[in-house]
Image (spheres, rainbow, N blue to C red):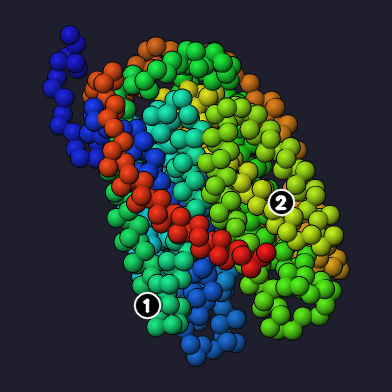
Amino acid sequence: MSESLARPMPASGLLDRERTVAGARFNRWLVPPAALAIHLCIGMAYGFSVFWLPMTKLLSNTDEATCKAQGLMAEMFSTTCNWTVPSVTHTFEMFIAVLGIAAALWGGWLEHAGPRKAGFIAALCWGGGLVLGGIGVSTHQLWLLWLGCGIIGGVGQGLGYISPVSTLIKWFPDRRGMATGFAIMGYGGGAMIGAPIAVALMKHFGGGDSSQGVATTLIVMGILYFIVMSAGAFGIRIPPSGWKPTGWDAASSGSRKAMITPHHVHLDVAWKTPQFWLIWGVLCLNVTAGIGVISMASPMLQDVFGGHLIGLDSLTALTTAQKAAVAASAAGLVGLISLFNSLGRLFWASISDHIGRKMTYSVFFILGMALYISLPTLGHLGMAGLFVIGVCLILTMYGGGFSTVPAYLADIFGTQMVGAIHGRLLTAWSVAGIVGPFLIAAIRQTQINAGVAHNLVYDRTLYILAGLLLAGLVLNLLVRPVDAKHNMTAEQLARERALQHEDRTAGDPAHAARGPFGLTGVLAWAAIGIPFLIGVYIALQKAAVLF
């Protein structure tokens, strides 16, 4: 026996990977609600828009002329001038950009550290970042808001987003898409729960004035999210090395689907393959097109249909009260977007288990192109209901793209380092999250400046988005299995497994995690499911005005 093997193993800490190995009484269906607990919290990223306007009204009796003249650097430290909407919305851009960067930088570390440690650090960063952002609001320091919510919170976003993915895929090798769909569904639906809570807390702490309740709301939600995410992190277990579901055979499963490899590709090799960059482009283009619709959904509905949304002729000049009613009606679309973005993640990822990941993305692009091209016609015909349905279908595929891609990567590169590879791929989201809204806003403004009517400015934009989907379709069709020369050798695989301490996570794969679902399972799913269903109910209530 070698000296390294003979040396006693060091005692593991509470957060270490080897302390999270499932025992005999564990049930794998307890992992999705633990993952959902993390994703529903970080999914509040999509609901942060409820803070923007209140954040611009924190101060009273400001000198308007002086404040308009100040630059961004002065605004970052000013305690006498209110912030502008563009300045506070940079927070969203920051944590989406940092999400991808953090996932790329620490994805490899996460594979070795395990989901509990990564999830707990994510809870510290996201929850602590919101608390720090709340302090920034209370002291009126814009830089502190950016640092807390944008940078530190963005790190929490990145680690929290990818921490359960690899584990879920290993627990559900028979249903990879469905498993990741459950977790990533939470990110799409987090705003349905978090946004109403934030609105209620701002009114409560502000005594009816939301702007005076922003700081306390951020601090309280940061603490709440830290507790919930920590519970999720400690609830996750990893399967013992070699574990598989009862009756499932990897060889026969892979033989039915040629794109599922039984081998593994190392992170350092995977990102240099054509397959990685093809899938990177596929995700980037799908997200760019979808986020373009998200960023302009409400104003687009108002501009295209106008008074038609409240039963008037679309060309009728609207009073102030009627404009407010049109805006309220269009706001219902925002709730529907969150709902369909969330449900689409589970639906399409589950479908991909049956038709394959490549075929699922082909459906996204072909059906998406048809919908984008048809929306201008539906607008011209005044068919608001069908227009809204088209937008909702588009958003299911936007969300479905996120939830299907981890399983796509596992099929192509194997499961050993899929979390790290997924983390690096998420830089596509960072790029799309910045480029998409900027591109759409620029095209829209250029047409308005050229004198194009407001109800027609989106036509060309939607056709351009359809073109992006066509490019995505071509990239997806080019994806092929990875060349065998890129697969890890037996020695490389053994070295990677040693770094993941699989010698300490061997457990008993034949008997581990064969326990009943039981009362624990019911309580775990209820703790996640009840708040989610309440969020769905609120979203449907808001959307009812559309119909």
Along the horizontal axis of the image, is 26 left or right of 544? Answer: left
Closer to us: 423 or 214:
214
Q: Amino acid at mark 1?
A: Phe
Name the residue beneath numbered marker 2: 390
Which residue shows up at 67% across the image and 60% down it? 297
Instruction: Confirm whether residue 235 shows in the render.
Output: yes
Which residue shows up at 22% across the image and 34% down it? 19
Image coordinates of residue 454 in percent, x first then y, are 80, 67
Image coordinates of residue 322 in percent, x first then y, are 71, 80
Identify the mark nearer the N-term, 2 or 1: 1
Which residue shows up at 63% across the image and 56% down it? 294
Along the horizontal axis of the image, is 437 left or right of 195? Answer: right
Which residue shows up at 43% across the image and 68% down it? 198
Image coordinates of residue 32 in percent, x first then y, are 39, 40
Figure quadrant of the N terminus: top left
Name the residue beneath numbered marker 1: 205
Closer to us: 369 or 453:
369
Near mark 2 (Cα within 10 A), the count class, few <14, some 14-19 or many ≥20, is some
Image coordinates of residue 226 in percent, x first then y, are 32, 55
Q: Quadrant of residue 351?
A: top right
Distance from disc 2 to disc 1, alpha carbons, whole Å, reads: 39 Å
